Image (spheres, rainbow, N blue to C red):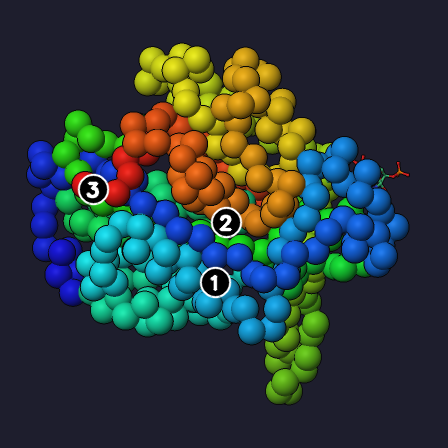
């Protein structure tokens, strides 16, 4: 790889796999309990836990920008991989809550000093991390790039209506990163994937631009920028998730001739424990092989999958060679799945 995203290599037999090498995460300091939320909106710890499995969530303070959290997560992943920032060819930041609509990934690249990497944002809500991981896989597996950081980071606390009990209890803030590397085909860790969109149902879950019109010149009306808080049809999104996630995972298992019993872990977007349970039931996967940290962090959107992976890698649950079925789903509507094999840092 040359400097700043300029491809110099063609596809070779040595480099048509992608290995998942390392991970890292960063969370805001403040944790908000269900009890605290019940002092603001008409809700209860019992309602939130029973309907969602969520017990607390982190809320970013004014100093804890998305850039800061994403950079901290990236540094942790680099340290875990044993890489320097100059080793990176690509930084993909999956987020729907950027510090800057022109792109936050370049800020992360600058903060890291990753001078050889091209960096850009990818927006696909709660499917964002998985879509970004698959996208990075295309560059690595084609031999165009060698090393990448895929970051999932969101701060939806800045975009919820804190008076709307149907949404403000669900979301939290966080960032996590996975370091991936081109590798021989035999060591490939992105075994199969699927990505889907259905924009006809975008209205189920929105963080939409506001439409405040302002006459700016004679005969010219401009629309002032701004965004409305998150609006969600929870029941529709729930039904969508429990229908589409098993379907996409089933396709992956069939395509690779994998039995659900062969999976070490089910690693789904952490939106609701009831969704995790429904998908696990569908494949008869026992609870001890379903990764969940909803109780501590709620739905951190693009960050949930790498945040959960980092926790399970660091506490020794996920080990090198483990087979992981993962699925992201959410606004768009968008959804996808990937069958992954965790490699871990090179010896
Ligand atoms: N506390 C107390 N009561 C509440 C709360 C709350 N926080 N929120 C809603 N209620 C009430 C409702 O007003 C309703 O009252 P009513 O019967 O008097 O009208 C009642 O509880 C039941 O509401 P439902 O919406 O039917 O509750 P449901 O069981 O569907 O649970 C939930 C709601 C948790 C949102 C669920 O639908 C869900 O998890 N949906 C999926 C959300 C999701 O997965 N999002 C992922 C994508 S995120 C992304 O892409 C950014």
Binning the other alpha carbons within 10 Å of mark 1 as few (below 14), some (14 to 19) or many (20 upward) gives many
Task: Give percent across and percent down for residue 114.
Answer: 26, 66
Which quarter is ligand 1 in? top right
Q: Quadrant of the C terminus?
A: top left
**Which mark is in front, 3 or 2?**
3
Which of label 2 and label 1 is nearer to you? 1
**Residue at which label 2 appears:** 303
Q: CA distance from mark 2 to mark 1?
A: 11 Å
Foreground residue among 27 and 88: 27
Residue 322 pos. (x, y %): 34, 27
Residue plotted at (9% across, 36% down): 14
Q: Nearer the viewer, residue 302 or 210?
A: 302
Q: Residue at x 45, y 67 (%)?
A: 67
**Which image quarter: residue 28?**
bottom right
Drawn side of residue 193 relative to residue 158, left or right: left
Vertical placement of 134 versus 31: above or below? Answer: above
Secondary structure of residue under mark 1:
helix
Identify the residue shown where x is 16% and y is 65%: 3
Q: Which residue is mark 3?
A: 346
**Quadrant in which residue 199 is drawn:** top right
In the image, taking residue 284 as reference, residue 255 lies left or right, namely: left
Q: Position of residue 72 (x, y in %)?
A: 42, 62
Reading the image, the residue beneath label 1 is 69
Q: Nearer the viewer, mark 3 or mark 1?
A: 3
């Amino acid at each position: 790889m040359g400097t700043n995203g300029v491809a110099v290599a063609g596809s070779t037999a040595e480099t048509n796999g992608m290995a998942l090498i390392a991970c890292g995460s960063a969370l805001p300091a403040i944790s908000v309990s269900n009890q605290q939320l019940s002092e603001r909106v008409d809700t209860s710890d019992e309602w939130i836990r029973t309907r969602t499995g969520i017990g607390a969530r982190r809320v970013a303070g004014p100093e804890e920008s998305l850039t800061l959290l994403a950079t901290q997560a990236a540094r942790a992943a680099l340290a875990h991989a044993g890489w320097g920032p100059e080793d990176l060819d690509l930084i993909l930041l999956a987020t729907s809550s950027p510090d800057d609509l022109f792109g936050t990934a370049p800020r992360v690249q600058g903060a890291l000093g990753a001078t050889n990497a091209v960096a850009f944002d990818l927006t696909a809500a709660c499917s964002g991390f998985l879509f970004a991981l698959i996208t990075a896989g295309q560059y690595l597996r084609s031999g165009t790039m060698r090393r990448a950081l895929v970051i999932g980071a969101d701060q939806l606390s800045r975009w919820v209506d804190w008076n709307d009990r149907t949404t403000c209890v669900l979301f939290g803030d966080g960032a996590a990163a996975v370091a991936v590397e081109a590798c021989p085909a035999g060591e490939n860790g992105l075994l199969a994937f699927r990505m889907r969109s259905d924009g006809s149902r975008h209205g189920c879950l929105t963080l939409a631009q506001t439409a405040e019109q302002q006459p700016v010149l004679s005969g010219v009306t401009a629309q002032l920028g701004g965004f409305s808080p998150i609006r969600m049809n929870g029941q529709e999104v729930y039904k969508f998730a429990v229908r589409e996630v098993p379907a996409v995972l089933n396709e992956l298992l069939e395509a690779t001739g994998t039995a659900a019993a062969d999976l070490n872990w089910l690693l789904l977007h952490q939106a609701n424990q009831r969704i995790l349970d429904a998908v696990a039931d569908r494949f008869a996967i026992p609870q001890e092989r379903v990764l969940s940290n909803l109780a501590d962090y709620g739905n951190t959107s693009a960050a949930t999958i790498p945040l959960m992976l980092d926790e399970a890698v660091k506490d020794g649950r996920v080990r090198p060679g483990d087979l992981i079925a993962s699925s992201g789903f959410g606004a768009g509507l968008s959804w996808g799945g990937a069958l992954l094999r965790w490699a871990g840092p090179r010896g």
